[in-house]
Image (spheres, rainbow, N blue to C red):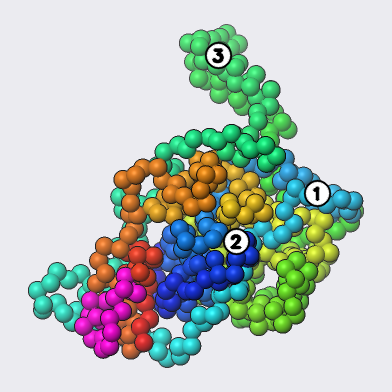
Amino acid sequence: MAAAGGSPSIVEYFGGEDGYRCGYCKNETGNLSHGMWAHSMTVQDYQDLIDRGWRRSGKYVYKPIMNQTCCPQYTIRCQALHFQTSKSHKKVLKKMLKFLSKGDVPKVVSEEEPMDSHIEDVGACDFAYKGESHVSQSELTPLGVDHAERVENEDQDTGEKKEEGNEHKVESDSLRLHADKGTPVPGEPSRSAKGVHAPPKPGKGADLSKPPCRKAKDIRKERKLQKLLQNQTCTVEGSQLQAADQVFLLQNSKSKTNQPKTIEDFVFVSLPDDAQHKLEVRLVPVSFEDPQFKSSFNQSATLFAKYQMAVHKDTPSECGENEFTRFLCDSPLEAENAPNGPECGYGSFHQQYWLDGKIIAVGVIDILPYCVSSVYLYYDPDYSFLSLGVYSALREIAFTRQLHEKAPDLCFYYMGFYIHSCPKMRYKGQYRPSDLLCPETYIWTPIEQCLPLLEHSKYCRFNQDGKAVDEGRIKELGRVRVLHKRTVMPYSVYKKRRKGPSDEASVQQYASLVGQTCSERMLLFRS
């Protein structure tokens, strides 16, 4: 589901910027990243970029320089379809139910639940607009396709092996991205070797690298199943059954009431008629053409300012309407509908939490081909007792599962970055099962295998196969697509036309970071 039929992504690459202040460890120049301005971007390109460690803040798309930055930021995703609610998650869900039905307000807010935004990239706004583009819209509008194809075919007479000419081939090849050998398919288990479990350090609480404790009744049940399997056959009501069938019966004999509760059991439960409060969650497309988005904009922007000043100590000028718009309303993603996609379509959305007719929280999300990606959350600090950071994350996991029913490929919930070197940010690892992205081979690795490695070093290659390489790496620089003087051309043609010093090093860096597939599909703007 690339840009077939739609317009391609157009980006301006800025390279590795100077170091910025880190919002995690407060180092003044330690935050290092590569960045580009996305004038427009297809949802498939952004999906492929976040699967290579990129992330957006407004229209600015950045990738931490993992082996140099002070606090390495690893892309984390939760396997939403297999998600298991923990005890503390259930506490938050029950607390919301009690508040809605009876108006109960807890006396003490539990300290173990992070009260901050669950997707908190502190300082993302600090650098996001330093590289803002000033290119005019007319320069970004490619001329007709026939003209572009003539240019792409320009140097076919040189006897070189040319494939750039067939623009449509590049587009169709990109659709087979996940079919290529060695490229991780969404939902495939990681191929990396198992890590060694490190013992928990005293005073650090539960060892997240170990499986959770099991209940005695579950262990008893398992023993009973193993005994049954040892007998080849057994008799039930006078008929012969294979042991496997008997096991199946036993597993399913547990009454529905004893089944562990899912998020849906808490979230979609019917409230009593005399419920004290009414909570409604509305999904609104981020577009000033959408009447719901437009009518709620002022209330939403006011809430953002209230949250930023109370929680992040922003000054009023740092969280005004312009800042709100650039950070959380400007999105490069092109809205898109697909026959096998979700009914709401793909693109950027605000998930608004309306309590008794007013907005108390907004989750900013991107709906992409394989995931719901959480961008930011802001909420009314007056309702912090409801643990809205945790509650909204659980709602977004439930929402991902809901979308999966109509869009089978959509089965992950991306939580932004996991930062092990910042203890305050480790709670993202509590949404299990989850995976971290290997910063060298871009293979997903179960978090349990990553944590022992991160205890020894803040920067880690998670893929333990020493011979494994980045399968999506750039192989042919000449095939990178460029937009120059409103004309689409492969880099091999642009290089011959270009006057002035060579920009090959910059283009090579860009292509190696976005990967071969995206570099052949997106347009790299060159002035």
Q: At 51% from the left edge and 62% from the top edge, which residue is drawn? A: 69
Question: Which residue is disc 3 drawn over?
Answer: 228
Task: For residue 269, say whether it is visible.
Answer: no
Residue at image position (33%, 47%) is 468
Count the marks. 3
Distance in Å between CA atoms under marks 1 and 2 = 24 Å
In the figure, residue 121 lies in which quadrant? bottom right
For discs 1 and 2, the disc positioned in front in the rendered view = 1
Observer-nearest residue: 174 or 78? 78
- Crowding at dot 2, Cα within 10 Å, few <14 / some 14-19 / many 20+, comes out as many
Task: Determine which residue is flagged by label 2.
Answer: 374
Q: Which residues are magenta?
A: 491-508
SS type, badge 3: helix
158 versus 378 height, above or below: below
Residue 247 position within the rendered picture, expressed as x and y whole percent measured from the top left: 55, 20
Quadrant of the snapshot with the C terminus: bottom left
- Disc 2, SS: strand
Q: Is residue 496 magenta?
A: yes
Mark 2 or mark 3, which has the lower sequence index? 3
Q: Nearer the viewer, mark 2 or mark 3?
A: 2
- Horizontally, residue 365 falls left or right of residue 196, namely right
Please tell me which of labels 3 and 1 falls first in the chain: 1
* Viewer-nearest residue: 478 or 423: 423
Dot 3, how many residues are within 10 Å of its Cα: few (below 14), some (14-19), or many (20+)?
some
Q: How far from the left and from the top, in percent, is residue 96?
A: 80, 52
> Relative to residue 493, is residue 368 depicted above or below?
above
Give the residue type that dot 2 points to: Ser
| Residue type at tag 3 | Leu
Q: What secondary structure prevails in the magenta region?
A: helix
Vertical relation: 75 (above or below) 28: above
Residue with the mark numbered 1:
110
